[in-house]
Amino acid sequence: MKLKVLVVEDSRTVRHMLVSLINQSADMQVIGEGSDGSEALDLTTKLGPDVILMDVVMPKMDGLEATRQIMQTRPTPIVLISATLGSDETEIAFKAIKAGALTVLQKPSVSGGIFETNSLLSTVRAMAGVHVIHHWDNSQPYRTLPLKPVSQSKPQIVAIAASTGGPAALSEIIWHLPVNFSLPIVIVQHITADFVPSLVGWLNHVSKNKVQIARHGEAVLPGVIYVAPGDNHLFLSKRQTFIVGPSPKVMQFMPSADIMLESVAESYCEKAIGIVLTGMGDDGAHGLQAMRRAGAITIAQDEASSVVFGMPGEAIRLGAAHHVLPLSKIAPTLASLCS
């Protein structure tokens, strides 16, 4: 059975291009087209699509408000597309992700190449299988070992891996960290490379500490939140400085969460906290396992609060997580561990 896709885009030219691309795929078909958010809401209710491909900026009702209403009435996987990397448009996109949309992609051009096309189709295909939620369930029980490090060493760094659903989860954690939280935080988030600066800008709005892209050769400073660049891998050297560049290994993702977490395990050993958040696939699971073996404290997000349980689920399966926590408990746990 083919995946049912709803396409919502106010430009007729772009909409027809998207419809044509999807209908050429053997396993997907467009079951409806809309030109604004209000039509997206109506068509979602009437047609029951498996996934919605929707523009961010549209007349009458934009992608943010449409996402909010769809997630309240008929939660459905939503993939957003953005025409530009301007701050206004990406601000709307990331707010929509916090409201329940799964990811944001740069809108393909009419003359886009095969990589651009395949990336869009593979994302739509993958997101169609995601069981979406429209709010975090904070009532779920959680399990954890006693909140004590294995060693008596005080943590010196927090390393976080995230993918689908990650921007919203990251903003939730960062927002609830205490004002005096002084550990550096290093993040690998799977997202289109061109959107990394916009993600950093958005996280700066919710953070009490500075958020910036990690740069090659920089020392890791207390209280700063670093996001890996989107076009290279990120390592932590034994001198506790950043190395940004290619990897000798062939990795599925760039940047790779496994590479970053493994380097933290080597550089900081037991003086670190590793976290794997919501995301598809298994990137970060083996890196978290390396951190646990090195004596670090390790955390995986629980299934109930994860948009996609792939990455944290694999980390739990490997026995890599000391703690399995709902999203709402991660920031308080970090504060407790670091106090």
Image (tube, rainbow, N blue to C red):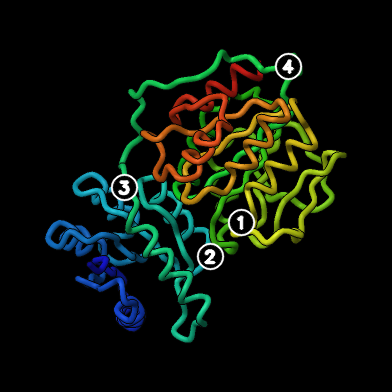
Disc 3 target residue: 131
Within-10-Å neighbours for mark 1: few <14, some 14–19, many 20+: some
Disc 1 target residue: 197
Q: How far separated are the C-alphas under marks 2 and 3?
A: 28 Å
Q: Foreground mark, 1 or 4?
A: 4
Within-10-Å neighbours for mark 3: few <14, some 14–19, many 20+: few
Residue 85: mark in rendering: 2
Look at label 3 and name its amino acid.
Answer: His
Residue 151: mark in rendering: 4
Task: Tell me the element at label 1.
Answer: helix
Residue at (31, 47) in percent of width and height: 131
Q: How far separated are the C-alphas under marks 3 and 1?
A: 28 Å
Residue at (59, 59) in percent of width and height: 252
Find residue 176 and report its horizontal and vertical position in percent. Answer: 51, 28
- Residues at circles 2 and 4 in contact by the CB criterion of under 8 Å: no
Question: Residue reaching furthest right?
Answer: 239
Residue at (74, 19) in percent of width and height: 154
